[in-house]
Image (cartoon, coloured by chain):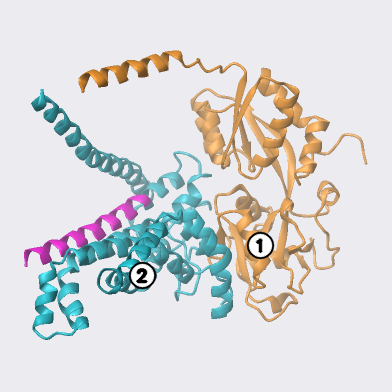
Amino acid sequence: MIKKLLILFSVCIFLIGCSPQKENAAGIQIKGSDTIVNLVQVWVENFVAQNPGISIGITGGGSGTGFAALINSTCDIAMSSRKIEAIELEAAQKKNLEIQEFIIGYDGLVILVNINNPVSELTMAQIRDIFMGNVVNWRQVGGDDLEIVVLSRESNSGTHMFFKENVLRMGNPNLQDEFSDDVLLMPSSQAIYDEVSQNPHAVGYVGMGFSSSKVKVLRVAKAAAGPYIQADVNTILSGKYPISRPLFLYTKADPQGLVKSFIDFALSPDGQQIVVETDFVPLKTKEPK
Amino acid sequence: MKKTKDKIIEKIIFICGILSIIFVALIFGFLFKEGIEFFRDFGLKNFLGSAVWRPTSVPPQFGILSLIAGSVLVTVGACIIAVPLGIAAALYISELAPKAIRDILKSLVELMAAVPSVVIGFVGMVIVAPYVRIILNLPTGLTAFTGSLVLAFMAMPTIITISEDAIRSVPKQYKDGALALGATNWQAIRRVVLMAAMPGIIAAIMLGIGRVIGETMAVMMVTGNAAHIPHSIFEPVRTMTATIAAEMGETVRESLHYRSLFAIGLILFLITFIVNFVADLFSGRSKNQ
């Protein structure tokens, strides 16, 4: 018995000794927001195709996870759908880290309703009233006599925060307006999309990439007088469509080597073309269109 | 040689046994440490005395009452469905079913236990929730009732298997004695077999409740997660487990919000502890009689 254990033990030691040392020199780790993980995945595939022999790891988990990992030096690039918060900057400073921010594109948020809902346009004020629980029946905004079921993302997703700050509080940091307590908080954009596609009561917000023929995307106006604008790349870039937000990559200050070339790739015309292909909005190009 | 071998194996088994205690103690210690810091900063009274859960607002509000109400409502609903069905199924399998049917039923019940919770949640979200909405004419199918249905399905294998074991371990003479005294088969089962198996059945129910109250993924997908005190079981609710799972990913590490999730974990741990304790008390008492 003991002999067997000894043999097993020595075999283990032998195997551990044989396994190759992991090469960290030619690899980077990227972590963070689930919103843009698909976009970054496509970037990485293209980047690796151009630079064979390197390894890049990507993990989702949320914007906060990415910042925590960046601060603890377990990743090189953090993906985020919100700006870094003061408390996270403080944590970085405690470790003598300088953080650098890159805006890599924009995301338009669209308001979805069921395909059978007669409502097809709303003003920002009406959207605000619906999500705050002041308007509870579709009849009040020109629809059928149905109770409104309001769907939102979870309270700590970057998308939820953005919607609260820019739609409910109208971009005014002094306002204290909140989502109604009756709002359903869904675990993912896919869950919001699924519920809206089968429930005529429902309304929700998701990123532009989720528009499809199974749901209706509302046209949105800044004021009651109109005009009501459909979300697309042009209306978001020109600022006519009112609900869009920047997307970020964060690194340690003054990135070098692979991290720098990856960021450069993301911001290059090729990288920005991929932004368009994954249903986000690219950065404004310098030459006027 | 034989003796030393015995000794070694005894030691190994002893370590395995003691390990589970160590793990539970470590987990409790960790939860306690993070939770206590939260109570010190935020106050136990504000935590347990409010139903407003707005963790990302300024100032944040961490009122857990609506979350406890959500968890309790879903759990009670699931028990009302699963306990009678589970016990009846166990009785049928152990007392009434012909051998061939019994074998098929038993393996099917075991298969039921092996379905991953995320799959059950997905089925609940895509199939059960729309039907709940249409059949009961509700504004949305994402309600506490849907959660109860889904969780009842998950608790039933536990309740059936353990109850069935308890019923089968009742000595055959008990039932034979009752029958000999002129009782009908149903009288003998209800008054003698069921009563004798009661400690085991209660243990089965408690284990089922334990599974229900701790279940996260399926619940998060079907209950709508609206953080308010529900007025009926046909409204959306937010459970404690879903809150932890949904918010942990994107929260800022070491923040008040991060600690508040550990505080919820602590409350959840206490509730499960009480449930288990009550179960022990019951089965201990009936054994002593």
Residue at left offset 84%, top offset 65%: A226
- Is B282 included in the stretch rendered in magenta? yes
* Most foreground residue, B31 or B23: B23
Q: In the image, residue A91 lies at what x, y percent? A: 50, 31
Q: Are the numbered discs 2 and 1 placed on the same chain, yes or no?
A: no
Q: Label 1: chain?
A: A
Q: Secondary structure at mark 1?
A: strand
| Chain corresponding to orange in the figure | A
* Residue receiving disc 1: A204
Whether residue A106 is situated above or below residue A201 in the rendered picture: above
Q: Residue at x 58, y 64 (%)?
A: B126
Query: Which of label 2 and label 1 is nearer to you?
Result: 2
Q: Which residue is mark 2?
A: B82
**Colour of chain B in the image:** cyan
Going 78% across and 38% down the picture, which residue do you hit? A274
Counting from the top left corner in percent of width and height, residue B31 is at 33, 44
Identify which amino acid the numbered label 1 is placed on. Answer: Gly
Instruction: Please tell me whether mark 2 sits on a helix, a strand or a loop.
Output: helix
Determine the main secondary structure of the stretch shown in magenta: helix
Q: Which residues are magenta?
A: B265-289
Query: Residue A54 in the image: x percent, y percent?
Result: 65, 21
The answer for which chain carries disc 2 is B
Q: Is residue B151 left or right of residue A116?
A: left
